Image: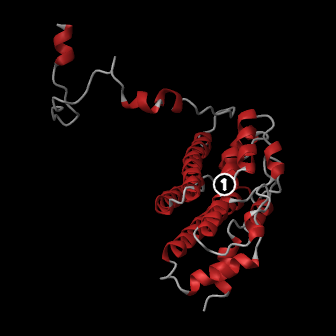
Amino acid sequence: MTGEADQAPQSDPVGRTLEEGIQRDFREDMSYGDYLDLGRLLTAQHPRSTPAQHDELLFIIQHQTSELWLKLMIHELRSARDLLAADELAPCLKRLARIKHIQHTLTDQWSVLATLTPSEYAQIRPFLATSSGFQSFQYRAVEFLLGNKDRAMVDVFAHDPSARAMLAELLEESSLYDEFLAYLARVGYGIPEVTLTRDRTRAHGVDEGLVDVFAEVYADPAKHWQVYETCEELVDVEDNFQEWRFRHLQVVTRTIGHKRGTGGSSGVDFLRRALDLTFFPELYAVRTRIG
């Protein structure tokens, strides 16, 4: 009788019988939860507040999901960079399009955290102790891949050998912008030699000779269409990154005002200074020349 019950048609709450072909028995076959490892994923939230605070789960999930999107962005940025190194510009542009959508999702997420009022956040902030978003090694990896490199940041992760190794590796490797410029040189653009041979462990600074190259591209977009399009895609990526930074600044301002960050930074002032950082300076400098 038990076996017959197991095989009986099942109905949903409004009385519709499930289709015959729908998989029901996952004792041996892979389920949705198995594939996504939901057993671990959905039990990875460990609120620390005592007594328990309702809003801590929001804070944890906001940051955990951000880290998942950052992981995907790193995956896509590495692929885009490697495609440029292989002179595969078209699929690189596909990667950049996906990266832009990831960025929009990350920025939109701030609106959820912004529902946390100063009074509510004050109830959970002490339990963060010295932890801070400043310590996100994946965020630093994204910055390194885009070209904002800082050797001092590597040692911040001395406590985490795998994170430190990842950043140390990215510090030495080419950034996305480095590979774009190397690609341009290979296809005949006059990229200054000093740019191609510079120390890639340091952040890129403005090169006026490179601005000249981009001025040529922007003077005749039809002639240089693929390069022109790639330049604008990179500007989109930077604009999106700046929008994310600004939303972060605004949410922090409305939540803690001008308090110091839990990780020891100056808080809002520290975040505001980050708005002056740029990954692709020549792509902005060239705009002064256009027209």
Few, some or many residues within 10 Å of mark 1 (<14, 14–19, 20+)? many
The residue lying at 21 percent from left, 16 percent from top is: 6
Would you say residue 90 is visible in this rendering?
yes
Question: From the viewer's perspective, is 107 left or right of 166?
Answer: left
The residue that label 1 is drawn on is: 145
Q: Quadrant of the N terminus?
A: top left
Residue 41 in picture, x, y percent from top left: 52, 32
Task: Residue 14: name its quadrant.
Answer: top left
Q: Nearer the viewer, residue 56 or 148?
A: 148
The residue lying at 47 percent from left, 58 percent from top is: 91
Question: From the viewer's perspective, is 243 left or right of 162?
Answer: left
Q: Secondary structure at mark 1?
A: helix
62 above or below 106?
Answer: above
Residue type, label 1:
Leu
Q: Nearer the viewer, residue 213 or 258?
A: 213
165 above or below 228?
Answer: above
Residue 102 in picture, x, y percent from top left: 52, 55
Residue 75 in picture, x, y percent from top left: 56, 47
Question: From the viewer's perspective, is 119 left or right of 109?
Answer: right
The residue lying at 63 percent from left, 59 percent from top is: 176
Number of numbered discs on residues: 1
Q: Nearer the viewer, residue 272 or 239?
A: 239
